[in-house]
Amino acid sequence: MRHHLVLRVVSKLLIPFILLFGLYVQFHGDFGPGGGFQAGVIFAAGFILYALIFGRENAVKVTPPRVLQALMAFGLLLYASVGVVGMINGGNFLNYSVLRADGVAGQHLGILLIELGVGITVAAVMIMVFLMFTGRGR
Amino acid sequence: METVLDIFSWIAIVGGGLFAMIGGLGVLRLPDLFSRMHGAGITDTLGAGLIILGLALQSGFTLITVKLILILVFLFVTSPTSSYALANAALSAGLRPLTAKKEDMSS
């Protein structure tokens, strides 16, 4: 891939915007179309594009598998712990209304944290799947 | 004013749809990969460009128009790049255009 100048230049230009769009879909998800799963996939697509153009070795330097494993677990933990905090505050599991004194504000915070957890986990898993597939036979 | 805008956006959207249809017909009917890619390229530039122009005329000076123009900019950057990558992959896999000369085959 060293000689593909066009692909290298265009992907260098586009990867920041792909990541930015992923974050937009993530944090705009409670007002418009979007959400954690889609945002995670878009975010991971940026990293996968980087790995395709600049080689797997460089991509592993950016996202080491140890960090990815930690992020997968962290996202799920965030999701589950928001539910448990709801239980501690006296509601059901994943009841957002009791997270804050104001019920609506609590629901805002709850869905934001839940979707953040989903996004982190999905992005980490997608990148990990790609790295595993491309790393076969090495 | 409204009517003029409506007429222009109708023309743009219908024209874009026509170009998209011609592109689809080209992908279906042209003989080999490289000429089919040419058909698909028309859909991306003129088809999508005219449709987005028509939609922008409908939405006026709002945030939606800014987003539509951003979509257009990214389409103009990414679609030639993907065409390039596809043609390059086909060439390095050994596929040659139908009308290629004998002396070009070796390269």
Image (cartoon, helix red, strand yellow):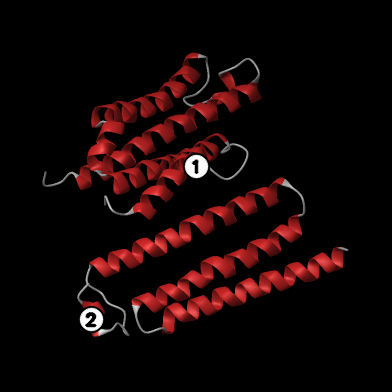
Question: Gap between marks 2 and 1, in whole Å?
Answer: 43 Å
Q: Is residue B90 above or below residue A55?
A: below
Q: Residue at x 27, y 77 (%)?
A: B96
Query: Could you tell whether A97 is left or right of B31 in the image?
Result: right
Q: Chain of mark 1?
A: A
Res. A69 visible in picture: yes
Res. A63 visible in picture: no
- The amino acid beneath tag 1 is Phe
Query: Could you tell whether B23 is left or right of B67 in the image?
Result: left
**Considering depth in this image, is A100 or A43 the residue closer to the camera?**
A43
Q: Is residue A96 above or below residue B45?
A: above
- The amino acid beneath tag 2 is Glu
- Frontmost of labels 2 and 1 is 2
Residue A94 on image: x %, y %: 49, 27
Residue A90 on image: x %, y %: 52, 15
Residue B62 on image: x %, y %: 74, 48
Q: Residue at x 61, y 43 (%)?
A: A32
Residue to which mark 1 is pinned? A17
Instruction: Name the image quarter holding the C terminus of chain A.
Output: top left
- Label 2 with label 1: CB-CB less than 8 Å: no
Give the residue at the far left of this rendering: A137
As drawn, the label of residue B103 is 2
